[in-house]
Every structure is written in C-alpha cells, then in structure tokens.
Image: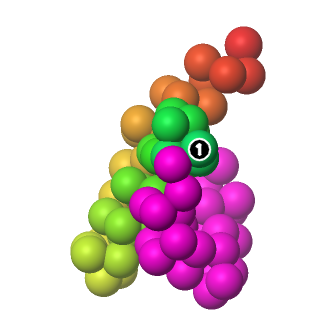
C-alpha cells in the first residue's frame, strides 16, 4: 500500500485532482474511499514530508475488498 500511495502522491495531475477538483464533484464525494484518499492527500501536503498513517483509507479499502 505504501508504494501505491507514493505513486499517487507523485502523480501531479492525480494529486491536483483530489486537492482541487474532487471537493466540487458531489457524486464522487459520497464515496468513502475517494473521501479518505482526499483527506490523506490533504494531510500529507499539510505535513510537508512528515510521517502519516493511512489508517482511515486502509480501513475503507478493507471493507470494500472483503
């Protein structure tokens, strides 16, 4: 999961989408995984290189991937 998240964070258009465009799209905003990813990217950008734990995202993925 760590390498996948690093790839997502390093993909500028995808990160930009989740930071800028995602909050405006009501249909996707209701999806738990998308919301958790948005929150994680926002937290990661705010920490500026600090360690973060993707616990909420991992829990949401676990529920869907049962």
- Quadrant location of the C terminus in the rendered image: top right
Locate residue 35, reporting x and y percent.
Answer: 47, 46
Q: Nearer the viewer, residue 20 or 7?
A: 20
Of residue 36 and residue 58, the one placed in the foreground of this image is: 36
Residue depicted at x 61% and y 24%:
62
Residue 60, compared with residue 8, is above or below; it is: above
Foreground residue among 14 and 62: 14
Residue furthest to the bottom: 12
- Residue 9 visible at all: no
x, y percentage for residue 58? 53, 36
Q: Position of residue 4 (x, y in %)?
A: 70, 59
- The quadrant holding residue 3 is bottom right
Describe residue 52's horizontal placement relative to residue 24 as left or right: left
Q: Is residue 9 above or below residue 5?
A: below
Please tell me which residue is depicted at 30% across the width and 82% down the height of the picture. 48
Confirm whether residue 25 shows in the render.
yes
Q: Is residue 7 magenta?
A: yes
Q: Main secondary structure of the magenta part?
A: helix
Magenta span of residues:
1-26
| Residue displayed at 50% across by 28% down | 59
> Could you classify mark 1 by the number of other residues whose Cα lies within 10 Å: few (under 14), some (14-19), or many (20 or more)?
few
Q: Secondary structure at mark 1?
A: helix
Q: Is residue 47 left or right of residue 42?
A: left
Residue identified by numbered label 1: 27
Relative image position of residue 25 (x, y in whole percent): 54, 57
Q: Is residue 52 magenta?
A: no
Q: Quarter-wise, where is residue 63 in the image?
A: top right
């Amino acid at each position: 999961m760590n390498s996948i998240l690093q790839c997502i964070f390093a993909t500028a258009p995808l990160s930009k989408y989740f930071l800028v465009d995602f909050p405006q799209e009501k249909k996707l905003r209701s999806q738990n995984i998308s919301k958790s990813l948005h929150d994680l990217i926002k937290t990661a950008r705010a920490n500026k290189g600090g360690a973060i734990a993707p616990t909420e995202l991992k829990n949401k993925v676990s529920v869907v991937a049962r």
